[in-house]
Image (spheres, coloured by chain):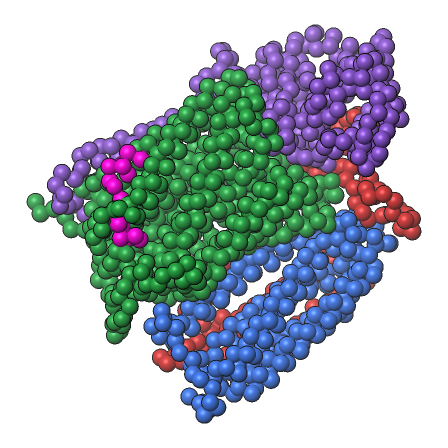
Chain colours: A green, B blue, C purple, D red
Amino acid sequence: MIAHVHHENINYLKASKGLKNWLVTVDHKRIGMMYLASILVFFVTGGTFAGLFRFELWSPLKNFLTPDQYNQFFTLHGVIMVFLVVVPGIPAALGNFILPIQIGAKDLAFPKLNLTSLYLYWIGAAIALYSIVAGHADQGWTMYAPYSLSRNPSVLWMMVAAFILGFSSILTGLNFIVTMHNMRAPGMTWYRMPLFLWAMYATGIMQIFATPVLAITLILLLMENFFGIGIFDPALGGDPLLMQHFFWFYSHPAVYIIVVPGFGITSEIIACFAKKDIFGYKFVAYSSVAIAIIGFVVWGHHMFVAGQSELADSIFSFLTFFTAVPSAIKVFNWTATLYKGSIDLKTPMLYALQFLFNFTIGGLTGIILAILSVDIHLHDTYFIVSHFHYVAMGSTMIAFIGGIHYWWPKMTGKMYNETVGRTAAILVFIGFNVTFFVQLIMGSQGSPRRYYHYQDQFQIYHQISTVGFVILAAGLFMALFNLIASFFNGSVAPKNPWGAKTLEWEEADSPPVLYNFKETPVVTHGPYAFETEKA
Amino acid sequence: MANATAGLPEHHVAHHFDTANQEFDSIKTGMWLFLASEIMMFGALFVGALIFLTLHPAAFREGANHLDWRLGAINTFFLLTSGLTMGLAVIAAQAGQQAKVRMNLVMSLFLASGFLVVKAYEYSLKIHHGTLPGRLWHGEGFHDPFVHVFYGFYFVMTGLHGLHVLIGMGLMIFALTRASKVQFSRSYFTPIEMVALYWALVDLVWVFLFPLLYLIG
Amino acid sequence: MDNSKTFWLPEKASTFVDTVDPAFDLYLWISIFFFGLIVILITVFTVKYLRRRPDQLATAQITHNLTLELSWTIIPLIIVMGLFFLGMKGYLHMRVAPSGYMQVNVKAQKWSWGFEYPSGAINDTLVVPVNTPVKLVMTSRDVLHSFYIAAFRTKADVIPNRYHALWFQATRTGIFPVQCTQYCGTNHSYMLTAVKVVEQEAYNEWLATASDPGKGKTPAEFGAILYQKRGCSACHSVDGSKAVGPSWKGLFGRQENCGAGGMIMVDEAYIRESMMVPTAKVVMGYQPVMPIFKGVLSEREIVALIEYIKTLK
Amino acid sequence: MSNHEYPGHAIPKPVIIGSYFTLLFLAAVMIGLSRLDVARFGIDWMDLHALKTCIIMSVALVMGIIVSMFLMGLRYENKLLNMTIFFSNFVFLFIFVLFTWVDTSFRGEVDPSFKEKINFTSPVKDEEPAAVQEGAAGAVIAAPAAEAKPAAAPASAAPAK
């Protein structure tokens, strides 16, 4: 292989000026940064909706929101967070930026398709925001029939938005899988790939095979709304449970699309900051793919009380327990990686350890829901709300913020302030656990979810949770401002500040040149080939 | 190269690929992944139809009886033949015969439009008989209370398939423009191959759609 | 047996408690063990192997250990299979009603529950005898709801146009809240009622009086009972305050503006029509969300309700 | 990899023409089979209609395999990647239809009253096809439970054992 010498050695931020160049770029790094900016904006929007009804729930009586406004806000919190923040989240922002560099390629396989995916995301986001003013959508992000069949214009616009965002997700997954198959640098075998890429590969499989079913569910829901074709609407002889089957066949793989990229980032950060090769590389890599496959066969556990046949309940419960095994493997392997390492508690490592803590609680509270008899009591209560927040917010978003801190020097060429970063990480940890651990107790005590007015005995839990929200919001904003501030007056970042062994740190500059490498790198060692201390 | 003297410019490999083979393999795997998401989309509709068939077989059979299988047979012939001409177009492109490529593409376009004409006629029959889904239903002489749901599935599935036929025809026109802009040869025939793959998918979906809706009655 | 509320679980009041609570507690201890193991290991490793010198390297690069890997694959698998059988055995016990149960029909509608007893009694709270299996055959009149009694550890969705059953057997008397746990609109969180568990004799007396609520009462008094029992109180107030629906105070004989339906005078015909086809003439400023009562209210009940409305000046 | 300088693989012309005619033939078989009136055989110990449906769908399956393996060139791929992508589609769809079917067809095992649908409206006019359809709601088709007093325990849901 002759090494291509690239004459464009200026970094991608200065390669071309002006908004127009940014909007029509096909450079995966710029698209990744634009995705990152949009996703953080929507994270703040979704968070404010959460904050509004968190304060409303301070007391069971009406504080400042009417029941309709409360219902509208929890719906918008759900839709924005799921479809606009956590599902695209890590793959679109960090995956787009880091994957080609970690693999040693100049760009993704289909750069123009990548830009199309970004524009589909923006169009879908615009329609989702328009649905706020187009009326009041209060059917929850799950859009169950027959409540979502009320031909409420705002609900219909929300469905169109989810439909478009689905295609943006498919195109990202397609780009990643093709790039990983065909464009690896010479010497980069499958087992020399960093685990972040294995997580992107597993996410790509789910994006390609699950999202089209969401597109069909939404088409059928729109047809049901406009023409009343009677597939889902019980009043016309349809079966609302069929809609739940279609919806959860996509939405359960979707929750694994949400959490698996978080695994990838955690593997990178823990290995790098413990200066130790990952324990059981093959087990961790294959457990990501195993979760992707098992994710397709368990969707029925969302419908144990919804009137599913007892046989289907038992089969789904049996299969759901198998998802516990890959997650357990991962958590044990990460913990074993710390053994005999040299652990440096910088900000990314704090977020990674937090991830381990939260994901253990999230995983354990998930497995109890697979026990049929206990799920009858716990279903649709705050226990479920707390479980999926421990996994979606406590694991994915915290790994996402950890990943942003970890790759910030590479992406912007600037170092963020370490002490402010660490305090923010601790604040986020305390705030998150105060907010959501009490909801576990409240849920098992029998407090249903999506309740505007609740029984008085649960007021103390809601108040603790709201206080926790304040701490969490403070921590998140501190981290956000710390990063933005470093963009302007941060110190110049060296090429490899953390001493990592993956391609993006060893070969590419910070920030990388337009085509990532001066000449195509040749890979000679694994992603975590750290040396050991000379005794 | 074959008749490079035809004066059409040669294709050059995109900058971020190293070799032509890598580019072709990437595009082909990318196409197959896109076709996979299309198959999952139609597959979900087939699952809905099969579940409806198991829940209300009588309604499904009664609805299917009222479909004219002859129109379905003509459409099957149109699609299979256009699949043939697309296959021949790929072979012609690999042999570098630009004129034969254009002729085959025009043949496929003609057959595809034939399919759409028959489909439009069939829809007008349905509108005339009033067998439209849901609220628009005002058909006579039907007994099963669920037969309108069959027509709900019928219109969603054939409508989505018809949309994909339209997209396929658009791609054929795009391939025609490419055929007059760049010289195809054994080392570069990607656009034709990809349009042929997409069209074969449209055939594949129709091969399953036709018996499920028309022949089970 | 102490039936009061524990740290994790609400008060105990049904036979299902012996199925759900032991499983919950067993799992609680399993998760405490694993969670504790992970947290202790992390803290120990982090403290022991903290990087003292900036260029300090790892003391050893252990990358895999097959016995360890297999053990933390097989052991969780065995534990979860045990949990599966535990869960399934309990679940089938909770789904299959024993013979000799007493059946009650439940009607869920947007934001109120209605209970109908085989003897014809109607009530807006569920009154059941203690220590007898009760089977609820539930259906909804508009959207999905879910019947949840936390104290009995049981829950089942209520699906429109279909019957869904749920059975329980109360073990002690008392009043236990019932909540709707499937999102159903504006007043989803106000869709509450209660299960009143009484001794068998008290139940028989109650049933006798409740079976024929109108007996020995003037139509207006019967109307007042129906106002509560039929869930009208969920949306219509009697003190003039505006709720989901117009207030019944001073309603009779009043002129109302129905927008498209034009100006109408509230008389017997209008009230009857509003019960049968509620969306026909909706008063301006109110949502057309009233459920259809055609086929639900008997002729005697309609007359009683109209008389009751007349008395509200 | 295929020969070094030529990307992809050329599907031989006879294969394409041969698969075309096979497909036409199989389509004819399918249509012929569907026109066959099974009542003529008078076999009652087996549901001939379901058998006919299965045969037709399996012929369609064979046609699908021919289209994918020969027309789409999966047979000539040297890397197994594209073929795994194609066939994993059907694995996921099979899982989807299997579990949804397990749910819908086994409902009401424990409680038979759960199977039937009550008081739903259908725009299809059954009894009086000629009558003009009045009102938007159409004929209200109630379950066997007496419509007059649905308050009474639905007949079908008598205390089932």
Q: Is A179 or B85 nearer to us in this picture? A: A179
- The magenta span reads A409-424
Residue A385 part of the magenta-drawn span: no
Q: Is C122 or A417 nearer to us in this picture? A: A417
Query: A424 above or below A5?
Result: above
Question: Could you say where residue C96 lies in the image, as x and y percent from the top left?
Answer: 62, 29
Question: Could you say where residue A497 lies in the image, as x and y percent from the top left?
Answer: 21, 49
Q: Is residue B100 visible?
A: yes
* Quarter of the rendering occupied by the N terminus of chain A: bottom left
Instruction: Tell me which corner region of the image, top left, top right, bottom left or bottom right, holds residue C70.
Output: top left
Name the residue located 69 percent from the left edge and 55 percent from the top edge.
B153
Q: Is residue A190 left or right of residue A178?
A: left
Name the residue located 35 percent from the left edge and 66 percent from the top edge.
A183
Q: Is residue B73 visible?
A: no
Q: Is residue A404 left or right of residue C200?
A: left
Query: C288 above or below C199?
Result: below
Residue at the farthest left position: A535
Question: Could you say where residue A179 lies in the image, as x and y percent from the top left?
Answer: 38, 63
Q: Is B64 or C262 nearer to us in this picture? A: C262
Name the residue located 63 percent from the left edge and 56 percent from the top edge.
B46
Question: Could you say where residue D9 lies in the image, as x and y percent from the top left?
Answer: 45, 77
Name the residue located 64 percent from the left edge and 81 percent from the top edge.
B107
Q: How many marks?
A: 0
* Quarter of the rendering occupied by the C terminus of chain A: top left
Query: A459 above or below B75?
Result: above
Q: Is residue A354 left or right of residue B205?
A: left
Residue at the farthest front position: A18
Instruction: Tell me which corner region of the image, top left, top right, bottom left or bottom right, holds residue D37.
Output: bottom right
Q: Is A218 or A135 nearer to us in this picture? A: A135
- The main secondary structure of the magenta stretch is helix
Instruction: Tell me which corner region of the image, top left, top right, bottom left or bottom right, holds residue A450.
Output: top right
